[in-house]
Image (cartoon, grey):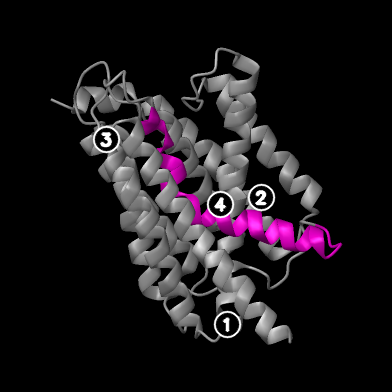
Amino acid sequence: PHIDGLWDRADSLWTLLGAGTVLMIVGLMDDRRGLPWQLRLGIQFFVAAACVIGRGWQLTAFIDSAPITWTLSVLWIVMLVNSFNMLDNMDGLSGGVATIASLMLAAVLLMNPDPETRQPQLFVAGLLLVLAGSTCGFLWHNRPPARIFMGDAGSYFLGFTIAIATMLATFSGYHSSRPHTVLAPLCVMAVPLYDTVTVLWIRLSQGKSPFHADKNHFSHRLVELGLSKTQAVLTIYLTTATCGLGALLLHQVDTAGAVIIALLILCVLALIAILEMSARRKINA
């Protein structure tokens, strides 16, 4: 009975694959020859704007201003594309986080019915499960010592696909009194976003270009604190899963419960930041 619905969404799937392929080609060219960051970022914004304005894919932000919603949606896509690219700095890291995030988001969608049909959101959940399956196959060959690497081509496609999936889905469900469920993607993406924000902050505070590659990523900082690369990757896996578990509960709690979940996730990230700063002071001393 769901096959007809799949054909109805086929145009969305082809658009997603087409736009994702454009970004993948850009990433491949950057891997092989190197492209100026201005060109890469410009193409990312163009593709994101085409999807948001041309296809009408946008975040559920409960904002009555279309330009603001469009802007937030474009920034969300570009942010996730670059977040997964930045995570691709150790064997198995970006692919593993993408797998965990895809599984978490798929679980949220299967537990949170579509507000119109009150049926599980099988199309987007299925897309995310296919993505998780493909990254699992990739991780087998990307485990240390890695035999293949995703590069910018793979990380761009992963980030873009997950970003679009969060827009095609409806996280608010049919519980009108629970608009906080739209925060589910933020819960799942808390760690990649934490890595991106902290890396940019460190680069700017050091007077460097935010687009200058370095070893100030979350994973590198964990290694500096004494963890092995494998331990650092597993720590990020567990942190991602911990934050993602909060997303599974959002549609079952009221506003007070959602605030508690958000505070717990912030506490996890704050604890990591405090431990990092404390340890780095000792190392520098």
Q: Residue at x 43, y 60 (%)?
A: 97
Q: Residues under labels 4 and 1: Cα distance? A: 21 Å
User: What residue did someone put label 3 on?
Assistant: 253
Q: Residues under labels 3 and 2: Cα distance? A: 42 Å
Q: Residues under labels 2 and 1: Cα distance? A: 35 Å
Q: Earlier in the sequence, mark 2 or mark 1?
A: 2
Q: Quadrant of residue 204?
A: bottom right
In the image, what residue type sits under mark 1?
Leu
Q: Earlier in the sequence, mark 4 or mark 1?
A: 4
User: What residue did someone put label 2 on?
Assistant: 26
Q: Earlier in the sequence, mark 2 or mark 4?
A: 2
Give the structural element (helix, strand or loop) at label 2.
Answer: helix
* Residue 148, label in figure: none
Q: Residues within 10 Å of mark 1 (few under 14, many from 20)?
A: some
Residue 81: x and y in percent read 58, 48
Residue 133 showing in the rendered view:
yes
- The region drawn magenta spans 180-209
- For the C terminus, the image quarter is bottom right
Q: Nearer the viewer, residue 218 or 157?
A: 218
Give the structural element (helix, strand or loop) at label 4.
Answer: helix
User: What residue did someone put label 1 on?
Assistant: 225
In the image, what residue type sits under mark 3?
Val
